[in-house]
């Protein structure tokens, strides 16, 4: 167990919070972190690119000119890949780039990513994240008070319409629900701001996985 400072949105210390070593103080498994991120980026690819092959080019297969006595190299068709408007020799077709990572690997990778951030003092723990009236000004003040000068991910326990709307207008400040947190979200942001309720969700999810493993 590790004891950490608990802050409010004004950046003031309002108490402390105990976080579990099983989530925030694990040995970093770089191989699984890399595998998970590669899979995340691969699964985001649409794979819809398509070129015409030689047989798919519209037209006829008639010789463009006589075989001999023209001074040109012989040509059998205008559909060849070396011809203007011809098909591709190795035409790209729609495909799936999906990569599968099992649940055990995902959990270990997420714990590794959080532990890495925790070790580098890049996680702030928040009492609550509440924005009344979806005011962008409130989120700006919050970012300034907590020193979030670069990219930051605010992790909350459940969706809040006002908080989501207000945060969406601030460049560099992102919002995510704890139950949907992934390794890529953790590592692409410079700082993590996790509410105490979100910590519970993350730790309970990890404990449930350990119990059913």
Image (spheres, grey):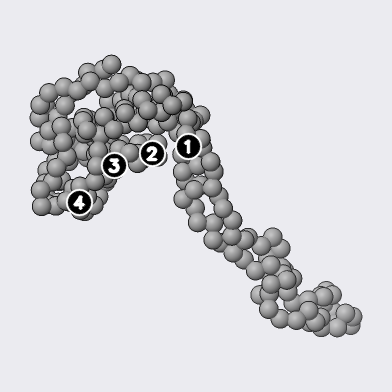
Label 3–label 4 contact, CB within 8 A: no
**Residue sitting at 14 percent across and 52 percent down?**
134
What distance separates the C-alpha of mark 3 from that of mark 4? 12 Å
Which residue position holds label 3? 177
Using the image, determine if residue 31 lies above or below residue 162: above
Q: Earlier in the sequence, mark 3 or mark 4?
A: 4
- In space, the residues marked 2 and 3 are separated at their CA atoms by 10 Å
Q: Earlier in the sequence, mark 1 or mark 3?
A: 1
Tag 1's secondary structure?
Answer: helix
Residue at coordinates 78% horizontally, 79% vertically from top-left?
Answer: 61
Mark 1 / mark 4, whichever is N-terminal: 1
Q: Is residue 151 visible?
A: no
Observer-side mark, 1 or 4, equals 4
Q: Secondary structure at mark 2?
A: loop
Quarter of the figure with the N terminus:
top left
Mark positioned earlier in the residue sequence (2 or 4): 4
Residue highlighted by disc 4: 161
Give the mark count: 4
> Circles 1 and 2: CB distance less than 8 Å?
yes
């Amino acid at each position: 167990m590790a004891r950490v400072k608990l802050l409010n949105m004004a950046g003031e210390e309002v108490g402390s919070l105990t976080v579990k070593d099983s989530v925030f103080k694990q040995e970093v498994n770089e191989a699984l972190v890399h595998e998970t991120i590669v899979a995340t980026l691969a699964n985001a690819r649409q794979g819809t690119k398509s070129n015409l092959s030689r047989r798919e080019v519209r037209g006829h297969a008639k010789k463009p000119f006589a075989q001999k006595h023209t001074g040109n190299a012989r040509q059998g068709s205008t559909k060849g890949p070396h011809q203007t408007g011809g098909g591709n020799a190795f035409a790209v077709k729609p495909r799936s780039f999906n990569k599968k990572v099992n649940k055990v690997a995902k959990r270990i990778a997420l714990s590794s990513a959080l532990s890495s951030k925790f070790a580098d003092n890049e996680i702030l723990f928040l009492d609550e994240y509440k924005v009344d009236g979806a005011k962008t000004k409130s989120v700006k003040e919050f970012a300034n008070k907590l020193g979030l000068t670069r990219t930051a991910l605010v992790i909350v326990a459940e969706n809040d319409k006002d908080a989501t709307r207000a945060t969406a207008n601030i460049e560099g400040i992102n919002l995510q629900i704890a139950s949907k947190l992934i390794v890529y979200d953790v590592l692409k942001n410079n700082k993590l701001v996790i509410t105490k309720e979100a910590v519970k969700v993350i730790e309970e999810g990890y404990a449930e996985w350990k119990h059913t493993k």
